[in-house]
Image (tube, grey):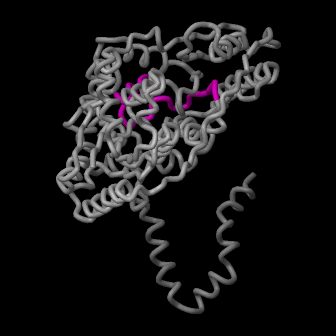
């Protein structure tokens, strides 16, 4: 069997993800496996047409394509995202059509499902036969149980290829409406007061819906907000996964480009941030992904606490549940507040005008009241993953995270609640007595559950 491995790690062969691929290669030596270090060589692949064509030629002659990558910021690395964009831009989709596909990722299982959903959808868009996905924790490979699981996964994928097993399509093609947004003069404008507003966009030129939406958002305020275009910010490259930032949050790029200064002096100092993007394949652009990935120099620390965040999206967002979930999750685990998500899907310029103005009003109102919505599973689950990993196996190299978590009480393990543990132990012991158990479970449970809440109501 001829296998083409598209490696998404910027570290090339010296990556955690590739060790899983190499393990499979050792177990099944009869297969011919060619590895392409996509993210590590993305600049050369983008500039050199021959380099890109060689990869596509190898894919075309393969029986199976393995998409292997570490999770970066809820998705694939920005370098990998750029390669996926190039496949469509350079009309290379035909080389992937009808090929079998498998996905192998490594992470700490934080939003790994959104990355897998994205890649499954990309494979569907390319007309590939999806044979399976494997989400590994970073060091699963050292555990015999997980090695056995990985071996079984590889066997199942290879059997699907050998038996020419059909594969169902999960994601339908995205609809592309030809709606052209023509904003009207803004009505009653919003006074931002002393709130600093930053609008981030990657719009190219002034004729796109995204550009028009940004212009209308600016016009919704009595004082024009600061607008920053990602294409105008000098960003040398994407995150390199080197983890040099783990000690003191200092990125390896340092002051060689403008990213760190912009993030520290513009984004962190804003009260309200609007992210504006256009759907490219099934996410925002690789440029947007690069901007988000580079923020990892902050590691797993929330740095936008209390800020108001809104989104302007051009494209079929309602058809991209995973993207919307990512958009909702980002402000939550930053301990910020999601104001609203406005897209141009409505297909009506007056309606879109109204939605943009409404979001502007809400952003100022929420900022004045310092409102942050309650957390949901998206951030609570994420916090528990980060808390446990940084306390344990990731305390080194993420020393800066550990210091911050200790200082800010983020090591909130339930085991430390001694009073509750004592009460629970007593009640569990008493519950072994039939009479006590019947009294509590059959007669008093409902009343006891609301008793703490009723005490608050009585005090009002």
- Give the quarter of the image for residue 318: top right
> 145 and 388: which one is in front?
145
Seen at 61% across and 42% down, the residue is 172
> 167 and 180: which one is in front?
167
Residue 134 location, x and y as percent?
Answer: 37, 52
Q: Is residue 302 magenta?
A: yes
Residue 240 location, x and y as percent?
Answer: 29, 28
In this rendering, position of residue 358 left or right of residue 83: right
- Give the quarter of the image for residue 80: top left
Seen at 82% across and 13% down, the residue is 188
Q: Is residue 424 magenta?
A: no
Q: Is residue 128 visible?
A: yes
| Residue interval drawn in magenta | 290-315
- Residue 344, compared with residue 452, is above or below; it is above
Seen at 59% across and 15% down, the residue is 196
Residue 242 location, x and y as percent?
Answer: 25, 31
Seen at 62% across and 11% down, the residue is 225
- Give the quarter of the image for residue 342: top right
Q: Is residue 406 visible?
A: no
In this rendering, position of residue 159 left or right of residue 321: left
> 297 and 177: which one is in front?
177
């Amino acid at each position: 069997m001829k296998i083409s491995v598209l490696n998404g790690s910027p570290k090339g062969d010296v990556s955690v993800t590739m060790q899983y691929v190499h393990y499979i290669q050792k177990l099944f030596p009869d297969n011919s496996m060619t590895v392409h270090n996509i993210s590590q060589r993305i600049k050369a692949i983008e500039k050199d047409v021959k380099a890109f064509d060689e990869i596509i030629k190898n894919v075309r002659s393969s029986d199976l394509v393995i998409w292997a990558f570490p999770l970066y910021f809820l998705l694939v690395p920005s370098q990998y995202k750029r390669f996926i964009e190039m496949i469509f831009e350079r009309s290379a989709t035909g080389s992937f059509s009808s090929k079998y596909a498998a996905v192998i990722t490594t992470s700490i299982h934080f939003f790994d499902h959104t990355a897998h959903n994205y890649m499954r959808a990309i494979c569907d868009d390319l007309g590939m036969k999806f044979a399976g996905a494997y989400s590994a924790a970073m060091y699963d490979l050292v555990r015999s149980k997980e090695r056995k699981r990985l071996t079984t996964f590889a066997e199942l994928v290879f059997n699907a290829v050998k038996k020419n097993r059909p594969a169902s399509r999960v994601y339908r093609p995205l609809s592309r409406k030809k709606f052209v947004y023509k904003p009207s003069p803004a009505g009653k404008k919003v006074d931002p007061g002393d709130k600093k507003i930053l609008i981030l966009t990657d719009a190219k030129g002034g004729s796109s819906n995204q550009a028009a939406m940004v212009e209308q958002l600016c016009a919704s305020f009595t004082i024009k907000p600061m607008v920053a275009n990602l294409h105008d910010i000098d960003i040398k490259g994407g995150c390199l996964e080197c983890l040099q930032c783990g000690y003191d949050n200092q990125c390896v790029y340092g002051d060689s480009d403008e990213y760190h200064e912009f993030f520290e002096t513009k984004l962190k100092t804003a009260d309200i941030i609007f992210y504006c993007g256009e759907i490219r394949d099934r996410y925002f652009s690789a440029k947007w992904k690069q901007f988000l990935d580079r923020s990892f120099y902050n590691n797993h620390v929330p740095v936008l606490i209390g800020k108001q965040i809104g989104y302007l999206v051009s494209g079929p967002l309602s058809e991209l549940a995973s993207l919307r979930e990512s958009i909702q999750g980002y402000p939550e685990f930053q301990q910020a507040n999601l104001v609203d998500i406005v897209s141009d899907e409505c297909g009506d310029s007056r309606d879109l005008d109204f939605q943009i103005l409404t979001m502007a009003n809400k952003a100022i109102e929420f900022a004045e009241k310092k409102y942050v919505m309650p957390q949901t599973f998206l951030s609570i689950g994420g916090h528990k993953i980060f808390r446990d990993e940084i306390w344990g196996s990731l305390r080194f190299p993420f020393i800066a995270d550990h210091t911050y978590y200790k200082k800010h009480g983020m090591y909130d393990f339930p085991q430390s609640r001694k009073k509750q543990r004592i009460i629970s132990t007593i009640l569990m012991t008493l519950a072994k007595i039939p009479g006590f158990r019947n009294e509590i479970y059959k007669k008093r449970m409902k009343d006891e559950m609301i008793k703490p809440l009723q005490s608050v109501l009585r005090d009002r």
